[in-house]
Amino acid sequence: MLGRGLRLLTVLAEHPAGLGVSAAARAARLPVSSAHRLLGRLVEERFATYDEDTRRYALGSRVLELSRGFQRSPAGYSAAAVPMRRLAARTGLPVIAGILHGSDVLLVLSVQGTQHLQLRSAEGTRNPWHATSLGKALVAGLPEDEREALLAGPLPAVTPRTVTDPGRLRAELAEVRARGWAEVDEENEIGVRSIAAALPPDPSGTPPLAISLAATVILTEAAQLRAHAPALRQCVDDIAAHRAP
């Protein structure tokens, strides 16, 4: 029962506009009667909402409460918050933390910078690993067999500038390992460039974390962003030194 309910929550998370009971049941691979019963219980517990007019179910406010609780917990990378705020204040740029989840990077924490033109990176957003500096920083540190598996998988072009050739990506990842940080230039979003560095593996088994600095191309030249790499590395070192043992 718990597994079925979690599958329904996952389906609702993937469809923010909401779903009718039949569509939700199909997506969760459940009988309609079971889905209807479970969705009703999720609504009672505020994990889901139901719109009488559209007859659609969507995520409820209780999910946000869980998300906030996760962020404050050691597993939620709470140790990263203060160093990330320091880096944002020092550079004026937004600072974003992400983990690798399958072939995507999942954004888990973000801190706004002070520039008048700000980028918005919502926590919970997923992006293809090969199009982001976070993803390249994380994948560069994987064992070779895991790296090659990702390089052999789908590598879609998110923008016209996305690198999709496995050979070029393989060379980039080697460069990331050599210098300690990754970069992308309008590969995930036109008008945005970023650099990122990954923390060393956590002995506790928590998924590896990477930190990035993002900037708009109209306000920050590539060389200016790269000049922040030492401060980025310092932020990563500070997080690693203060995370829970």
Image: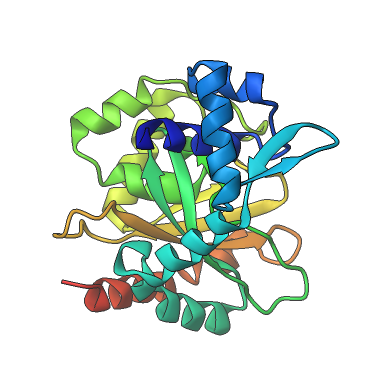
Q: Is residue 119 above or below residue 7?
A: below
Q: Is residue 206 left or right of residue 137?
A: left
Q: On the rendered structure, is 59 left or right of 168?
A: right
Q: How is the image coloured?
A: rainbow
Q: Residue at x 62, y 72 (%)?
A: 112
Viewer-closest of 117 and 20: 20
What residue appears at the point 82 percent right and 33 percent down from the top-left corner?
54
Q: Residue at x 16, y 59 (%)?
A: 204
Question: In the image shown, does 38 or 107 lie closer to the viewer?
Answer: 38
Question: x, y (%) of residue 125?
Answer: 56, 47
**Count of marks placed on residues:** 0
Question: Above or below — where is 115 with respect to 103?
Answer: below
Identify the residue at image location x=77%, y=69%: 117
Above or below 12: residue 209: below
| Residue 236 visible to the viewer | yes
- Residue 218 lies, in percent from the top left, at 76, 61
Q: Is residue 162 visible?
A: no
Task: Describe residue 215's horizontal placement relative to residue 45 as left or right.
Answer: right
Of the 4 image quadrants, the one containing the N terminus is top left
Q: Quadrant of the C terminus?
A: bottom left
Quarter of the image for residue 116 reads: bottom right
222 in relation to 131, above or below = below
Q: Where residue 178 appears, x then y in whole percent?
A: 27, 52
In depth, the one of 144 and 122 nearer the eye is: 122
Horizontal relation, residue 220 to residue 181: left or right? right
Measured as percent of width and height from the top left, residue 179 is found at: 32, 57
